[in-house]
Amino acid sequence: MGRLNDILEANKMTEKGTSGIYELFSQKNINFMLKLTNFTQSDINSIAKIKDCIGDIAQETVSSFYDYLMTIEDVRKIILSKPGLLDSLKLTQYSYISQLFGLKYDEKYFANRVTVGFAHYVNKISPSIYIGSYGYYNTLITSAVMICCKKNGISSDESINILNSVQKLLSIDITLAIEAYYQKSIDDVDKTEHDSLDRLIVLAEYRDEDTGRHISRMAHYSKIIAKGLGMDKIFQENILNAAPMHDIGKVGIPDAILLKPGPLNKDEFEIMKSHTTIGYNILKDSDSEVLREGAIIALSHHENFDGGGYPNGLSGEKIPITGRIAKIADVFDALINKRIYKPAFMLEETVRIMKEEMAPGRAFDPDCFGAFLKNLDEILDIRKKIDSEAA
Ligand SMILES: [Fe+2]
Ligand SMILES: [Fe+2]
């Protein structure tokens, strides 16, 4: 997979997009496409009959293709926007035909299809232009195949078979290229979503914590607890991304209360409690699943398992599981670190307070608390790691 790695590297794929492409590129998927199109060895044998002839007229086909594309104003503008682009496109297209009719449908062939898909996205070629030009390209290939069949004295029945095989190949080809295009675009949307999320979170923590490390730490603890509970990978990723928003509603709390060094009086505490509902209202209608999960955590991370928490006094399993998990992560991090209203506690004291004063069954879900204790070493490791990275 060396070549594929180079391609991914060159296209600066993020982890998520990369795994998407790997999946797309996996042998299983390729086999699936081959099966679906019923592309077999006999198709390869058919294509072999015109391979050399197509090679001879490939140059001509490429020229016709670009002559046509250059008559479309929007495409022409894109192609002429970069010096040398037309020549390099022609060259790519030429090597593509050689590959298409080279009869070696191996890793390199499929990797090239993926690159072509990326390249069109990266160069901001709209899907309508991209897919549309495939249509025109198809007509050129069809007529090239017919010309070659005629030249080689192939019967018309046999010609239709060959054309069929070429069509199957083209449909696999376009599927891969468009999948790659689509994956790359999803990847970019995700990046934008993450970026806005990060900004939103920074806004909330800016006024509260002295560093942004609290939210990063508690989000990672939440993920570890979720893993300890046997939740799947998607759940773990979701809670990792959503938990940082638990206190986002603090943007709506006045500084005099939020930054007060001592304990809050009853009225102040009532206002402070509203950070849960404020956060929920900010996030709840989002199109993003992660933000909606953030809304749920914002609303439920101060509920107590025995029903004595706020804002809704929910108890037991009526409290969303992500809220029950995030609560433990949040409390642990608040106790073990210094806060404006309290010193940092030692680990033993932190665990004692959580076990005895807050207690599973009272403040915490006993199962979640069990998963927390069982994975405390991993939680301490990630804490150390985050703090050392920030130092
Ligand atoms: Fe909170
Ligand atoms: Fe917090």
Image (spheres, rainbow, N blue to C red):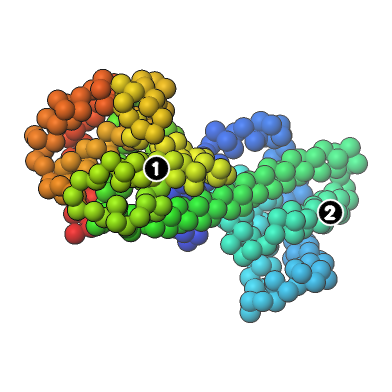
Q: Position of residue 385 (x, y in %)?
A: 21, 49
Q: Mark 2 = which residue?
A: 139
**Callout 1: SS:** loop
Q: Give the answer, above or below, for where 227 lies relative to 195.
A: above
| Label 2: few (<14), some (14–19) or many (≥20) C-alpha neighbours in 10 Å | few
Q: For the point 81% across and 43% down, which residue is it?
A: 163
Q: In front here: 373 or 331?
A: 331
Q: Give the answer, above or below, for where 238 lies relative to 193.
A: above
| Label 1: few (<14), some (14–19) or many (≥20) C-alpha neighbours in 10 Å | some
| Label whose residue precedes the other's in the sequence (2 or 1) | 2
Q: Position of residue 181 (x, y in %)?
A: 61, 52
Q: Is mark 2 within 8 Å of ligand 2?
A: no
**Callout 2: SS:** helix
Q: For the point 20% across and 46% down, which residue is it?
A: 263
- Gap in Å between the C-alphas at discs 2 and 1? 64 Å
Q: Position of residue 276 (x, y in %)?
A: 40, 41
Question: Would residue 94 appear left or right of 61 to someone viewing this image?
Answer: left
Residue 264 seen in render: yes
Q: In front here: 115 or 287?
A: 287
Q: For the point 50% across and 43% down, which residue is it?
A: 281
Q: Is mark 1 within 8 Å of ligand 1?
A: no
Q: Mark 1 = which residue?
A: 274
